[in-house]
Image: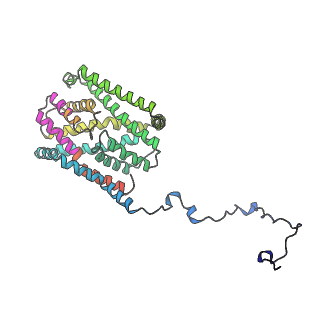
Amino acid sequence: MTPLPLDETPGPRPTGSATAPAAPPAPDPAAGAVALPALPYRFLRPPGSVPGPAPTATARLLRRLLVLLPVLLIAVWVAFDWRTVYDGCVRLGSADPWWLLAAFFFTCLGWLSSSCVRQGALPERLPTGLLIASQFAAGAANHVLPASLGAHAVTLRFLLGRGIPLARATASLALYSLVRPIAKTLVLLLFLLTSPDLLRVGTLAPDGRTLALAAGGVAGAVTVAAVLVTAVRPLRRPLLDAVRSALTDVRVLHTMPSRIVALWGGAAAAPLLQASVIFSVGAALGLTLSWAQVAFAFLAASTAVGAVPAPGGIGPIDAATVFALAAMGAPLDVAATAVIGYRVLTVWLPLLPGALALSTLVQRKVL
């Protein structure tokens, strides 16, 4: 019988007395570090440098639409509310240009104060230029969505892009939202304590029904939040993580003097800068109220109706501010024109540049 090819071996068959293969020699300690086996180049590159799959045509189209979305939303808003801008620009045409320049200066300082509060809400140092650019872009988004959702969304994307964990980023947003009204209330109380006669507090003091409605709204919001945390289990853990991170960051931040000054100083300066814009526009139109009266009127109006969900507070705060200025003794038409000029300087003029900045930050993957 002819043997199969597999039965034929080129060399002698191993016997039972054959020894096992010799173990590799031990490394010589004097020879230095042991050489590791060579790895493919793709394992040696940092994780962020590994190229992913090429984006599809749909993904590229979606990204372009997201870049253009802020500009499209602003164009739609202008189409529906162009009369406000037109009337304000016509009335401001005869105003004092130097006072208008001062109002624009205070508007720019408002973006810096917002950046200070954002930085003060985090222990990590953020890049100054990108932080200011993100807040300038967040201002455009804030005037499109109500209750500061647009500004918070832009800031959240910015913080995540800087490597801040999601729980700590949301905790910083919560701290920002909490510190701003507290600081505004403290400034308002300071005005009440220092000059109650000059400010005509009695004409602006709310009655018992208004106070009851405000207290009921606060109690209802707290109750709804407690029910959601207790009943909706998927929300419980993220909220508890955010609260835990917020408490930790608050303790750390208040051991850093620079963060304390940035957080509370920026939050206290923000409403005063907004009031300075209204005062400058009013002075350009011939308004005779003092800065303290205008600041108190704006603080009282924004504190009373600031919780009403509206894009950038436009609408409720405007009407309340006009009423407060009229109650302080300003002519109604001049007060309305001053508020319109305030909105033109703080909303409409920076709206298109802010939308372009937002689109640029999205395109460059900063957000």
Colouring style: rainbow
Residue at the bottom extreme? 2
Q: Is residue 313 visible?
A: yes
Residue 10 appears left or right of 45: right
Nearer to me, 259 or 220: 220
Image coords of residue 349 (percent x, y): 22, 49
Nearer to me, 15 or 343: 15
Residue at the front extreme? 1
Image vertical order of residue 175 relative to residue 364, above or below: above
- For image coordinates 22% across by 35% down, the residue present is 316
Q: Quadrant for the N terminus, please.
A: bottom right
Nearer to me, 215 or 184: 215
Nearer to me, 237 or 190: 237
Q: Which residues are magenta?
A: 320-345
- For image coordinates 17% across by 43% down, the residue present is 99
Q: Quadrant of residue 190?
A: top left
Q: Any magenta on residue 289?
A: no
- For image coordinates 26% across by 24% down, the residue present is 192
Residue at the top extreme? 208
Residue 83 appears left or right of 15: left
Q: How many marks?
A: 0
Q: Is residue 102 visible?
A: no
Image coords of residue 73 (percent x, y): 26, 50
Image coords of residue 3 (percent x, y): 81, 78
Q: Any magenta on residue 327?
A: yes
The secondary structure that dominates the magenta segment is: helix
Image coords of residue 33 (percent x, y): 69, 61
